[in-house]
Amino acid sequence: KKAQEAANELKVEQAEREKKIDEYNRTRINQEKQSEFEIRQARIDAMKEGFDKQKAEIDLTYDRLIEENRKRQEDWVKELQNKEREEWVNKNPNYKKEGKVFTPASTAQDLSEEQRNALKEYTDVANEYQMAETDKLYKELLDKYRNFEQRRTKINEDFDKERKAIEENKTLSSSDKNAFLVELEKKRKEALKGFNNEEIAEMQKSSDLMIK
């Protein structure tokens, strides 16, 4: 009988060691996830200001929120399983001698309705955050494009008015008109070139992807 009890206790000890190994692996995975977030944050901090940096920041914040919620669920299930184990030990006080090994049955489905609702709400908040901030970011980018288009149109309208005034001027000779018009179009081209360079610089600051 003693030999059997000793064998049973070894069986239980082995099972408990395996459980500790599993817990260690879970802890390591969680730590690696946090390290991954820190590396991503460092890369974002090193990025130049603009669209890409803001988008990366939004995505990182979203991933952090989702990971926090996953961890929250994991912790709640763990608490439930610990409670389940204590109840099991009370019912099986001689489990070591009898060689009984506790196997938790509790899962996320066994969490209280309040806990499940809270987890869903956290997920919804994360999704809403990502959608709202991304929409806002793209709107700001589109507003910049619209502003540049409006300014380009205004430049052309101003030069068109000057061109019309020259063409309708009856005191100028035909050769003078042509000379003025050539000079005018040269100035228009220079104005638009300077404007286009400004636009490209601003859009490149907003996102390298937008000008490729």
Image: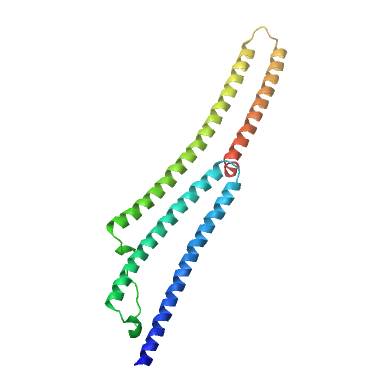
Q: Indicate left or right for 112 with 71 as reference.
A: left
**Quadrant of the snapshot with the C terminus:** top right
Give the colour scheme of this rendering: rainbow
Residue 104 quadrant? bottom left
Q: Nearer the viewer, residue 17 or 65?
A: 17
The front one of 164 and 101 is 101
Q: Quadrant of residue 171?
A: top right
Asked if residue 19 lies left or right of residue 50, the reply is left
66 shown above or below 201:
below
The x, y position of residue 111, in whole percent, is 31, 61
Q: Residue furthest top?
A: 171
Residue at 34% from the left image edge and 93% from the top image edge = 1
Q: Is residue 59 above or below residue 138?
A: below
Horizontal side, residue 152 vs residue 125: left or right: right
Q: How many marks overall?
A: 0
> Nearest the camera: 136 or 122?
122
- Nearer the observer, 66 or 164: 66
Q: Quadrant of residue 50?
A: top right
